[in-house]
Amino acid sequence: MKQSHIAIAVIGAIVVGAVGYLIGVEVTGRGPSTAVTEAAVKEYLENNPELLAPATPEPTVVAGLSDQQKREVETTIRSHLIANPEIIRDAMEEFQRRQEEAEREAQMAAIEVNKDLLFSSERQVVLGNPDGDVTIVEFFDYNCGFCRRALDDMKRLIEEDENLRVVLKEFPVLGEGSVEAAQVSIAVSLVAPDKIEEFHEALLTQPGQVNGAIAIAVAEEFGIDTDALLEQIDADEVDDTLTEVFTLANELSLTGTPSYVLASDVVIGAVGYDALRDRILTARHNCETTVC
């Protein structure tokens, strides 16, 4: 085997290892800077000295070479990586692209398998046009600051799009207070479904962190019977609703709020009115069924 071919092969092995290392320390969704890449390469090589270590009597990855040839290969690898640290960056970007593509494919499959629970579950609140031609599902948490910011975007979308159907899924991931608030909200949807929209908006715009007590106080402002709420909170239906939502979120690999799901799309984060409107228009354009 030619010495240059051996060098390239070993460089590839180091790149794969360094990419895995670098991904563990870099913020997801951002390519590393040259400085970060160079530092990662250096640290990776320092943490894996056997890659550049002098030849030893034990068998090595590169067999059949003289000691001099091995040293030349090692020097070539080190020089090439230091001179071209973008190799690591480019490899990591490609690795991330493939991960995102695989995740999207898995999410689309999960949407198809779980479409009935996602879009037509009996355990959900529907805003906007209940017979709309496009449905967007929002997974939210009452203590999520980004969900609060996104409230105006959702209201505007409903106001401007008469054919939009919005499904709310309680996804309390930010602590016990969030769970308690979600339980009260589900109870409100059972006890006073005609008041759930105004309750939802009022609770989501409360200052500071909310919990069960605050949620009940908000419900009382709308004349909702507290005893009836407490009775529902202790009933199985509330827990069953939360279990259903968390199961869906797990299937879709959702880990934060807000998250939005359409018939063939998953949107993570408070992306803003324009981005959501574009996703809805795309869903409408691609719609081939009565529920999109």
Image: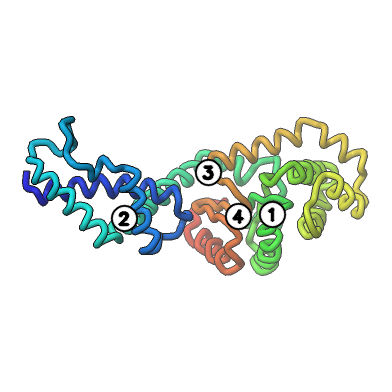
Q: Amino acid at mark 3?
A: Ser
Question: Which circle, 4 or 1, is nearer the viewer?
Answer: 1
Q: Which residue is mark 1?
A: 144
CA gap, disc 4 to disc 1?
Answer: 19 Å
Q: Which residue is mark 2?
A: 88
The tally of labels here is 4
CA gap, disc 2 to disc 3?
Answer: 27 Å
Instruction: For mark 2, give the secondary structure.
Output: helix
Could you say where residue 2 lies in the image, as x and y percent from the top left?
Answer: 6, 47
Q: Does residue 38 appear to the left or right of 263 in the view shown? A: left
Q: Residue at x 13, y 44 (%)?
A: 70
Question: Which circle, 2 or 3, is nearer the viewer?
Answer: 2
Q: Earlier in the sequence, mark 2 or mark 3?
A: 2
Q: Earlier in the sequence, mark 4 or mark 1?
A: 4
Could you say where residue 95 lies in the image, as x and y percent from the top left?
Answer: 35, 51
Give above or below for 143 relative to 156. above
Question: Which circle, 1 or 3, is nearer the viewer?
Answer: 1
Q: Which residue is mark 3?
A: 253
